[in-house]
Image: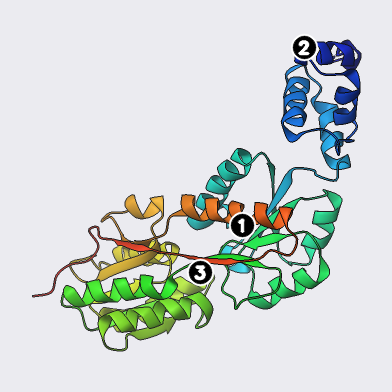
Amino acid sequence: MWDENKVRIVDIAEELGVSTATVSNVIHGKTKKVSEETIKKVERRLEERGYIPNMAATLLARNDSRIIGVIVNDHIKYEGHVLEDPFVCAAVNFLSDEIEQSGYFMMLKKAKDIMEIVKFASMWNLNGMILLGFCEDEYQELRDRIRVPFVVYDGYMNEQNRISNVKIDDFDGGRQAGAYLKSMGHEKVLCIADNEICMDLDRYRGLCEGLGICADFLKIPMAKIERDIFYEERLSVIREHTAVFAVSDYYAIDLLNFLKKHGVSVPSDISLIGFDGSKESMNTEPELTSVHQDNSLRAKKAMELLVKMIRDPGFSDSICLPVKLEVRESVSCLP
């Protein structure tokens, strides 16, 4: 069994060329007078020498814990599988890289209620947070209850006090999809979404702008079983259209599978476009045309904003990132 007494402070100090007091201060979280470079050097050597059990307590005891919480809304629409969602998976993957490269540790949490975050942030002495999937009023309520800085990763919101937001150009994404469908001869276009507000509404409005006419709209159920029944009851309505624009790859791929099951060919019978540009969109048959967002850039910008907020409690900003339609195989040209 590991014995921490075998790791002597004096040995660590001699190996690194620092004083024993410096090593002791890092171990016990007394780092106000120790440089960030020295802290990292000592922590790294302590980890290499097997001092990890003590380091966890050290991180929590310090005013600067170096822990960034990534909190994902465990919404009912995910039916208990939120971390399997392509968009969420990609976001967490790239955020993990950016957080580590910035010298912090990532702690991931699912939450059904945004107020769960208050206790979570306090318990783990979080330096900052990045939030995914909650609503505008929830973000402001949390901001009023907590001092820990946070960045909204994918929110739809007006400018808010002490809240930073990294959003994408949802309207332009829809516009690009609409303009492409128009160029391919499509006029009878259907948009599917599970709501008629916020970013989904912007995507729909952009679609209509690109088409030059109003597309039809279907509000679909969130639950998979209910959605299949909904589609079955409205299959004839769907087939009246030459193309469908889904506000996410998740719903586009789900519809693609449903149509295949019912003998409807994409794109021969109906064209299909998604939104997000996920890896899954490239693994469908046919490959899904989709509005691509750069998750790597989004994660980078989110972390840059959060670091600025950590250093300056009065700082907040919002960034809007561009999107690009990735043309693949799921849209056909009408005669």
| On screen, residue 43 above or below 187 | above
Residue 137, image x, y percentages? 69, 78
Q: Which of 255 and 261 is in front in this view?
A: 255
Sooner in the amino-acid sequence: mark 2 or mark 1: 2
Q: Which of 163 and 124 is in front in this view?
A: 163
Sooner in the amino-acid sequence: mark 3 or mark 1: 3
The residue type indicated by label 3 comes to Ile
* Mark drawn on residue 225: 3
| On screen, residue 97 above or below 201 | above
**Residue at 78% of width from left, 14% of height from top?**
17
Mark 1, residue position: 305
Residue 330, image x, y percentages? 25, 62
Q: What element carries label 1?
A: helix
Can residue 233 be seen from the camera position used here?
no
Mark 2, residue position: 15
Q: Which of 196 and 219 is in front in this view?
A: 196
Residue 335, image x, y percentages? 8, 75
Select label 3 or label 2 by which is in front. 2
Q: Is residue 228 left or right of residue 144?
A: left
Residue 26, image x, y percentages? 85, 30
The residue type indicated by label 1 comes to Leu
Separation of disc 3 and disc 1 at Cα? 40 Å
- Residue most extreme to the left: 335
The residue type indicated by label 2 comes to Glu
Separation of disc 2 and disc 1 at Cα? 37 Å
